[in-house]
Image: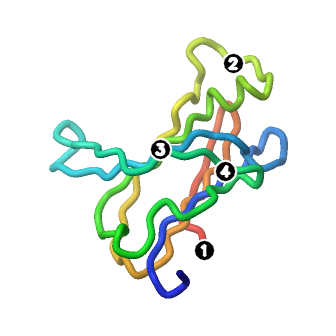
Amino acid sequence: MADTGRLTTHVLDTTHGRPGAGIAVTLYRIEGGGMEDDVRTRLVQTRTNADGRCDAPLLAGAELTPGVYELVFEAGAYFRAAGISLPDPAFLDMVPIRFGIANADQHYHVPLLISPYSYSTYRGS
């Protein structure tokens, strides 16, 4: 699989200093001309494993095409299950990350570093 493009992710829980295990992750493809006209098509629903990663690439090979995508992480449910008391509504509940894939032959890795009140992401390797 190293010779084909792929999309992967992982989650780090910065509150506890450990992988974000068991977090529900949904991947959408975004089509449209702007936020109000966007159409989201769900492609993948999965959960992170004990290492905070998905067991397989979210997309790989011919499934990965140039375009706009969105990953949605169910962070609020994860922190509630970990015993953290969150306000209602939670400051961060569903965390969306919208990004573009320009070259389907490359590896796109989209990590999420998360706490109940902040998150960050970047294009990883």
Q: Secondary structure at mark 2?
A: loop
- Spatial CA span between label 1 and label 3: 20 Å
For disc 2, the marked residue is: 86
Q: Are marks 4 and 2 in contact (CB under 8 Å)?
A: no
Q: Residue furthest right?
A: 17
- How crowded pointer 4 is (Cα within 10 Å; few <14, some 14-19, many 20+) is rated as many
Q: Where residue 11 appears, x then y in whole percent? A: 66, 51
Q: Is residue 39 above or below residue 109?
A: above
Identify whether 120 is placed above or below 96: below
Mark number, residue 11: 4
Q: Label 3 belongs to which residue?
A: 26
Amino acid at pointer 2: Leu
Near mark 3 (Cα within 10 A), the count class, few <14, some 14-19 or many ≥20, is: some
Kindly indicate whether the residue at mark 4 contacts the one at mark 3 (C-beta within 8 angstroms). Answer: no
- C-beta proximity under 8 Å, tags 1 and 3: no
Q: Earlier in the sequence, mark 3 or mark 4?
A: 4
Cα separation, mark 2 vs mark 3, equals: 22 Å
Q: Secondary structure at mark 1?
A: loop
At 84% from the left and 40% from the top, the residue drawn is 16
Give the secondary structure at mark 3: strand
Mark 1 belongs to which amino acid?
A: Ser
Q: Which residue is mark 1?
A: 125
Query: Nearer the N terminus, badge 4 or badge 2?
Result: 4
- Residue positioned 58% across, 55% down in the render: 121
